[in-house]
Amino acid sequence: MRLGEGVEWTLHCCLTLGWLETDEPVSTAKLAATFDLPPAYLNKRLQTLVRAGVLSSTPGARGGFRLARPPEKITLMEIVAATEGAEYAFRCTEIRQKGAGAERPAHEFQRQCVITTAMRKAELAWRRELASQTLADMLAAAPVAAAERTRDWFDRVG
């Protein structure tokens, strides 16, 4: 399974907002500069988290983003689903019913394909694992020095 780079971006931004522990919104420009990312594209990604209720946004010159809920109430699955979409990664197109399978009777295809079953089972395990982990878990697991460096950087750039 391959996730887009937006997942890494949004997870890092959420982690950063958690480390900053501020009620003040953090601008897209500052978040983008933190990771040397394109601000316009990052803003689009962060807006998906606003629509999902993970972040809140404040418009205007002093606007930006902040966590919409406490970190222990935000799961990694919420962030991934908001960024990537909630569709399954594996999409069965029923190729077993084409080619040589096209001649077989329809009743042979009433049961779900064993490949689809196996892939869905694996993906559901992956989703459950992400749903069991919160942003607070990541904040607790990250090195303390990383949080301190992030806060120091934000203090310096104002």
Image (cartoon, rainbow, N blue to C red):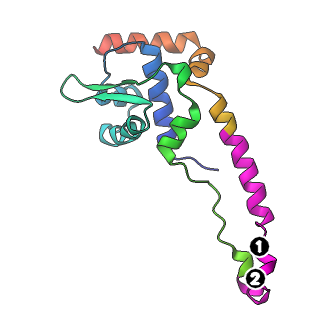
Report the residue at 41% width, 25% height from top: 68
Residue lying furthest bottom:
103
Q: State the image coordinates of residue 118 (x, y, percent, origin top left).
A: 78, 56
Sort mark 1 into few (<14), some (14-19) or many (20+) by Cα contacts within 10 Å: few
Chief secondary structure of the magenta span?
A: helix
In magenta segment, residue 11: no
* Relative to 139, 56 lies left or right: left
User: Please, is residue 109 above or below residue 124 in the view?
Assistant: below
Q: Helix or strand or loop: what does disc 2 sit on?
A: helix
Residue 110: which disc? 1
Q: Nearer the viewer, residue 34 or 102?
A: 102
Q: Amino acid at mark 2?
A: Ala
Q: Is residue 101 magenta?
A: yes
Residue appearing at x 62%, y 54% in the figure = 89
Visible in this render: residue 5?
no
Q: Amino acid at mark 1?
A: Gln
Q: Which mark is residue 106?
A: 2
Say whether residue 147 is left or right of residue 111: left
SS label for mark 1: loop
| Residue range corresponding to the magenta coloring | 98-127
Q: Residue at x 31, y 29 (%)?
A: 57
Image: 51 above or below 150: below
Report the number of numbered marks.
Answer: 2
Question: Which quadrant would residue 102 be assigned to in this image?
Answer: bottom right
The image position of residue 48, as x and y in percent, is 40, 41
Q: Nearer the viewer, residue 40 or 33?
A: 40
Callout 2 touching callout 1 (CB < 8 Å): yes
For the point 32% across and 22% down, the residue is 26
Distance, label 2 to label 1, CA atoms, is 7 Å
Image coords of residue 113 (percent x, y): 77, 67
- Circle 2 residues within 10 Å: few <14, some 14–19, many ≥20: few
Q: Position of residue 59 (x, y in %)?
A: 23, 30
